Amino acid sequence: MAMWNPWRGCKKCSDGCLHCYIHKGDTKRGIDTANIVKTKDFYKPIEKLKNGAYKMKAGLVYLGFSTDFLIEEADEWRSECWSMIRQRQDCTFLFLTKRIERLAACLPDDWGEGYENVVVCCTVENQKNADRKLAVFHSLPIKHKCITAQPLLERIFIEPYLEGIELVVVGGESDRFARPMDYAWVLDLREQCIRNKVSFEFRQCGTHFIKDGKQYNLKTKDLCAQARKAGIDFHATGGCFSNRNP
């Protein structure tokens, strides 16, 4: 698995952004997150070794995890990224976005029904944004779609939008000021996915985690491990997540 951040920086735009890891990390380093700039890794996918081989190995590539790939300030740079993505057909590029309503205006001219090597993950956190964003997501031509409900802030019903979705990832908020997440919400989403034969992954518990009416305060380092211990992931057949998770 590789990471590609062609630019960095972001701006809060959704209810899930309150305790964003990008902003928290930048604050610690004294960096202005609102300053969206290209990085030294902009051309990372096509950089080559002396023998002509690509430096970045084939396989899954996490794209834009220090920003939002669809952020407005990067519009002038994105076409070059699409060109590199087309060139690296041996890689599968996955990006999350809280700006799914911008995708149609950000697509390359040859997108058609979608690139086979691109996975788009629409991020939602509550029912209001699930209804607004997933209605748009459902209408877009994308070969591989997944939904990321992280941080999950309330019980949400997304079953009407699961057609064509390959994976739903769920997780809680990780911060000492984190908003609580109830395990019952997680299980409810899991049942919606199972009914529709959509893969489901419980990625991480929340710092303030409620189970059977009791709240637990968990350490950040334990959030993913505790979610795995629950053993509730569901793997449907078909799609690019049949044998691996992002």
Image (spheres, grey):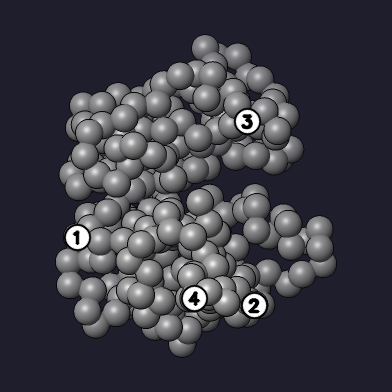
Give the amino acid type for the residue marked by disc 1 in the picture.
Ser
Give the amino acid type for the residue marked by disc 2 in the picture.
Lys
Q: Nearer the viewer, mark 1 or mark 3?
A: 3
Give the amino acid type for the residue marked by disc 3 in the picture.
Leu
Q: Residues within 10 Å of mark 4 (few under 14, many from 20)?
A: few
Residue that label 2 marks: 40
Q: Which mark is residue 139?
A: 1
Q: Earlier in the sequence, mark 4 or mark 1?
A: 4
Q: Earlier in the sequence, mark 3 or mark 2?
A: 2
State the image coordinates of residue 162 (x, y, percent, origin top left). Answer: 23, 42
Badges 4 and 3: C-beta atoms under 8 Å apart? no
Residue that label 4 marks: 52
Q: Secondary structure at mark 3?
A: helix
Q: Nearer the viewer, mark 4 or mark 3?
A: 4
Residue closest to the far front: 51
Q: Which mark is residue 223?
A: 3
Residue at image coords 52%, 42%? 151
Q: Secondary structure at mark 2?
A: loop
